[in-house]
Amino acid sequence: MTVDKLQENLGLTYLCCEDIAPTKEIDGCYCGDLLSWVMSRAEPGNIWLTVMGNINSIGVAVLADISCIILTENAALDEDAKKRAEENDVVILTTHKNAYQLASEISQII
């Protein structure tokens, strides 16, 4: 499944890089907010569910080769982070749901 199909199925809202979403393949999901933990445990192609919308999360997403970041609970995306995401082709979406709710829905479709 691609990020754009996931967005359609779950009604997520794009915050950044919508144009490259059709090229981003999803291969699993990782939930977590401790950046060092995510960097060492998330697998390439994972969706990353987090509330961390700062510039450091973009670096982690690039290093871990994440398919997209989904900011849960309407967490804010910093302007600096958005700029860095655009520079590095990191797709970012948002939802009002918490990580558990969203992960449950994701597990039903991927």
Image (cartoon, grey):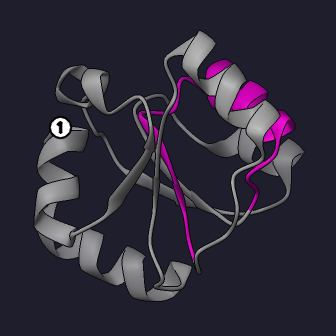
Which residue appears at 85% of the width and 36% of the height?
A: 56
The vertical placement of 28 against 9, above or below, is above
Say left or right for 30 vs 26: right
Residue 56 counted in the magenta span: yes
In this rendering, does residue 24 appear at all? no
Which residue appears at 81% of the width and 45% of the height?
A: 54
Say left or right for 5 vs 79: left
Which residue appears at 17% of the width and 37% of the height?
A: 2
Say left or right for 4 vs 34: left
Residue 55 in percent (x, y) is at 82, 35
Q: How many marks?
A: 1
Residue 79 in percent (x, y) is at 75, 39
In this rendering, does residue 94 appear at all? yes
Residue 18 in percent (x, y) is at 31, 33
- For the N terminus, the image quarter is top left
Q: Which segment did they paint magenta?
A: 52-72
Q: Nearer the viewer, residue 37 or 7?
A: 7
The vertical placement of 3 against 6, above or below, is above
Indicate the secondary structure of the residue bearing disc 1: loop
Q: Residue furthest front?
A: 79
Q: Nearer the viewer, residue 74 or 107?
A: 74
Residue 34 counted in the magenta span: no
The vertical placement of 88 against 6, above or below, is above
The vertical placement of 83 against 13, above or below, is above
Circle 1 residue: 2
Mark 1 Cα-neighbour bin, 10 Å: few <14, some 14–19, many ≥20: some
Quadrant location of residue 19? Answer: top left
- For the C terminus, the image quarter is bottom left
Residue 4 in percent (x, y) is at 18, 42
